[in-house]
Every structure is written in structure tokens, then in C-alpha cells.
Amino acid sequence: MKQLRIGTSGYSFDDWRGPFYPEKIEKGKMLDHYVQHFPTVEINSTYYRIPHPAVMARIAEKAPEGFDFMVKVPQSFTHRRRDLEADIGAYREALQPMAESGKLSGVLAQFPYSFKFTPESLDYLARCRDWVAPHPLYVEFRHNSWVNRVMYDRLRTEQIGYVCVDEPDLPNLLAPDAFATTDTAYIRLHGRNADKWWNGGALRYDYRYSTEQLEEWREKIRKLVKKVKQAYVYFNNCHEGQAVENAKQFAEMMATE
């Protein structure tokens, strides 16, 4: 399944030393190690701080040809949603070196649970798409009010990618559906740690998927990839390297297709 690319949400984690990285690896060497195991990764650090373009250039240089990145938009885009002129310009500049390298495949906007479906919110997504153009925009919602036909049709019209998610079975969170609104499918698996989801901080992502749970997604993605040109699956259950373990396991499962 050459059109399916599997990776993790971020790679620079201290608690991956031991489970994945050598114990004494330097932070600056982590990506060199990561690219030997996966063909793609999400850059999540841009959510917290917009980097200097030189930083993104160095990241792109470390990755071999054929490797690609999805880069998260700043939280000001998804949470503050006002007074964004400076951030828009800085973010576009930061992306430029990676885009010029040919290794930037798109940008991810992860909206909070409080961002609910309204006509005004739909319009805001179109503005976000324009801010990051020409790079493809993929949007992740946390409130299930978004899962409706109006959203689906609008995203298809605007050519904005919908992000499918796996998360705990809690009220008003999204169900683990598998569909796409562009010719690229995008799936993020966050884990199902219901006890820590609302108040657990980073422990929200302390979760290891069972083989049976991955089989559920294997069947969904097997059908989905037949309808699109490209599909990305990222594991975000990053606590203590569990994302790496599940991503490798899932890649092996999908390789048997």
C-alpha cells in the first residue's frame, strides 16, 4: 500500500530514550534516528512557538528524500483566533524552507473542544486555508457537532482535509469514523485514556492500543485508501514511546495487505 504513510505525532521526546532512542542520544540527533524507522512525522512544536525559518531548514535537511512532514499551525490560529496578522506572516516564513525542500506535505489545525460547529466557524476554516495556501490544510475537531453533512460538503468544496480521530468514548467527542474530504486521508490516533482525558495533562496520551483495536482501524483504512490518492496515519499516544510501538505494529499489519 504505497499510498499509505504511517508515523507519529512528534519525535523529540525525552521519555522516548530507552523505549525507542538510545539512552544518551542528544536532542539534535533524534530525527536522524527517527527517519530510519518511519517515512513521515508531524511537527507539533510549531503549535507552541513559531520557529525561525532556519530551524525548519535544518529539520528538512536532516530528512532523506522521500520523507515528508505535516506541520501544526500555531495555537493562536486555533484557540485565540484574532489579532493574527503577525503570526500569519511569521508562520508562512517558517514553512518556506521546508516547502522549498519538497518535504512539506501539509499543515494541521487542531481545534479545541470549545470550537463548535457554526456557520461563522465554517467561514473561519476557509480563512485559515487562505492563510496557509498553497499548502494543503487539514483540520481536526474535538467536538462532535462538526460531524454533519454541511461540514462535509463545505470542506469538499473548499478543498480542506478532514482529520479522522481515535479518542476515548466520551460525551460529545468524535466517533472513530474513517472518511476524507479531499483526495488525501488523514488519521490521528490519540489513545483511549478516558480517565485522564479531561484532567490528566500529558497523561491524556498514556495509552497503548491493543492488536484488536488496531485491527478495527486496519479494516477502516483498508477501505479508505481505495478511495483516495494518499493516506496518513499518525499515532499521538506518545507517552513513553507507546506511539512508536503502535505505529510500527500497525505498519506491519498494513504491510500484509
Image (tube, rainbow, N blue to C red):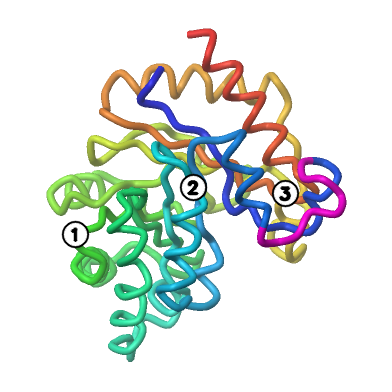
Q: Position of residue 11 (x, y in %)?
A: 63, 52
Tags 1 and 3 in contact by the CB under 8 Å rule? no
Quadrant of image for the N terminus = top left
Q: Residue at x 57, y 21 (%)?
A: 216
Residue 27: in magenta span: yes
Image height of 2 relative to 82, above or below: above
Between disc 3 and disc 2, the foreground one is 2
> How far apart are labels 1 and 3 at the CA level?
37 Å
Label 2: which secondary element? loop
Instruction: Give the amino acid at mark 3.
Output: Ala
Q: Position of residue 52 (x, y in %)?
A: 45, 78
Question: In this orientation, which residue lies closer to the viewer: 191 or 33?
Answer: 33
Residue neighbourhood size for the residue with mark 1, other residues' Cα within 10 Å, grouped as few (<14), some (14–19), many (≥20): few
The part of the chain drawn in magenta is 20-28
> Dot 1 corresponds to which residue?
134
Q: Is residue 135 left or right of residue 236?
A: left
Tags 3 and 2 in contact by the CB under 8 Å rule? no
Q: Residue at x 72, y 56 (%)?
A: 204
Instruction: Give the amino acid at mark 1.
Output: Pro
Q: How many marks?
A: 3
Dot 1 or dot 2: first in sequence order is 2
> How far apart are labels 1 and 2 at the CA level?
22 Å
Q: Is residue 210 left or right of residue 257?
A: right
> Dot 3 corresponds to which residue?
194
